[in-house]
């Protein structure tokens, strides 16, 4: 791999095993400074394993990785001073107030008293938590806890921030608020590595992304470039239930033209002549008295790309292997 001088993170042939399971299989990618890089894939794909290695919580079995030129194994202590991390679950102390949580992080980061107090107050305001700053965190909503967790990762002003599925479980409003914060951070020069299962999140936030499946990087590009691989529009037909969708997909598969792909009660047909495909599909279904509940022609999504790359949808529940980073004894 040729390393770009503007790269904040460089990962080369990173490998990690948990017993007989290969969680990461020679993974390589680079993250440009001051950008959002996404690791996209289903549960068990290896995303969290990669993050835990980059944040020095796990040691790789092979390959190497560096953050701001510092090796994550040889220079682990120095790396920790350059990064912030918010994991999949908020790790703030629910018995402390929001302000006390952030001040505690400042003290642990060995900031001066005046500095961490001012920093805590500024972050509480920025994350919309100033009015709740004196309340115990146990009284916070899930969205408030997630925002406080990200704020805690920023107390020491790290130039590189890792967010491991930060919006999991959040409602749409809380998710949008956190997206806005991430955009502001990048505008100020922070490098963000984001893992997510949400295709829309990756599409909206990332400058570049790697699609991970079964511990391997199967694509590394911009979201726009990945979607352009399809080079077509998508015809989506929604049926009343999975049974009628299965019947409709089987019927459409007998016709000449694009192969139907079914997910739950929806059928997708990808074609450069989407209008003609839609008309033909509706006519075919009508002859068999199958009535769609909704139809649309749209541009390709990242889910369509994932289907093209892997043969299954990104939200399918059968990953290639379980991500065992939570089994700490295996590390």
Image: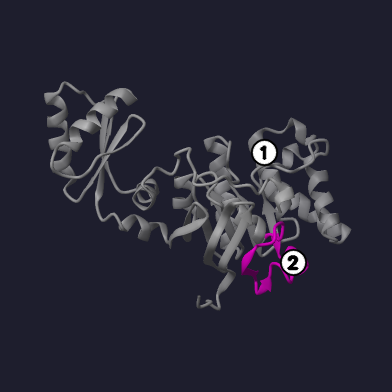
Task: Name the residue at the front extreme.
Answer: 20
Q: Which span of residues is magenta-colored?
A: 55-83
Instruction: Please tell me whether mark 1 sits on a helix, a strand or a loop.
Output: helix
Q: Which mark is residue 264?
A: none
Q: Which mark is residue 144?
A: 1
Residue 157: quadrant of the picture: bottom right
Residue 68 picture location, percent across and down: 65, 71
Whether 69 is among the magenta residues is yes
Instruction: Please tell me whether mark 2 sits on a helix, a strand or a loop.
Output: helix
Q: Is residue 131 above or below residue 181?
A: above
- The CA distance from mark 1 to mark 2 is 31 Å
The residue under the point 77% across, 50% down is: 121
Q: Is residue 37 left or right of residue 277?
A: right
Residue 243 picture location, percent across and down: 31, 23
Name the residue tied to disc 2. 76
Q: Quadrant of the C terminus?
A: bottom right
The residue under the point 20% across, 23% down is: 290
The residue under the point 45% across, 46% down is: 199
Q: Is residue 165 above or below residue 219?
A: above
């Amino acid at each position: 791999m040729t390393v770009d001088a503007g790269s904040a993170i460089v990962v080369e042939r990173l490998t990690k095993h948990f017993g007989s399971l290969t969680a990461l299989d020679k993974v390589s990618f680079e993250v440009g400074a001051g950008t959002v890089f996404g690791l996209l894939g289903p549960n068990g794909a290896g995303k969290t394993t990669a993050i835990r290695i980059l944040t020095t919580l796990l040691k790789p079995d092979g390959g190497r990785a560096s953050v701001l030129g510092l090796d994550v194994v040889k220079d682990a202590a120095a790396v920790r001073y350059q990064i912030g991390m918010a994991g999949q679950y908020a790790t703030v102390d629910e018995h402390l107030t929001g302000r006390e949580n952030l001040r505690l992080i400042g003290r642990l980061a060995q900031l001066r008293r005046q500095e961490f107090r001012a920093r805590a107050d500024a972050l509480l305001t920025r994350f919309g938590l100033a009015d709740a700053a004196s309340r115990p965190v146990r009284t916070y909503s899930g969205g408030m806890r997630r925002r406080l967790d990200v704020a805690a990762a920023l107390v020491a002003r790290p130039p590189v921030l890792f967010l491991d599925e930060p919006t999991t479980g959040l409602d749409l409003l809380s998710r949008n608020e956190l997206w806005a914060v991430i955009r502001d951070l990048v505008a100020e020069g922070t490098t963000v590595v984001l893992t997510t299962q949400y295709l829309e999140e990756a599409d909206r936030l990332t400058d570049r992304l790697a699609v991970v499946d079964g511990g391997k990087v199967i694509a590394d590009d911009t979201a726009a470039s990945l979607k352009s691989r399809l080079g077509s529009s998508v015809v989506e037909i929604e049926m009343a239930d999975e049974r009628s969708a299965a019947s409709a997909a089987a019927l459409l598969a007998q016709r000449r033209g694009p192969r139907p792909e079914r997910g739950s009660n929806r059928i997708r047909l990808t074609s450069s002549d989407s209008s003609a495909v839609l008309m033909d599909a509706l006519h075919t279904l009508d002859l068999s008295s199958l009535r769609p509940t909704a139809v649309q022609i749209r541009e390709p999504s990242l889910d369509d790309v994932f289907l093209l790359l892997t043969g299954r949808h990104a939200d399918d529940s059968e990953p290639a292997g379980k991500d065992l980073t939570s089994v700490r004894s295996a590390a």
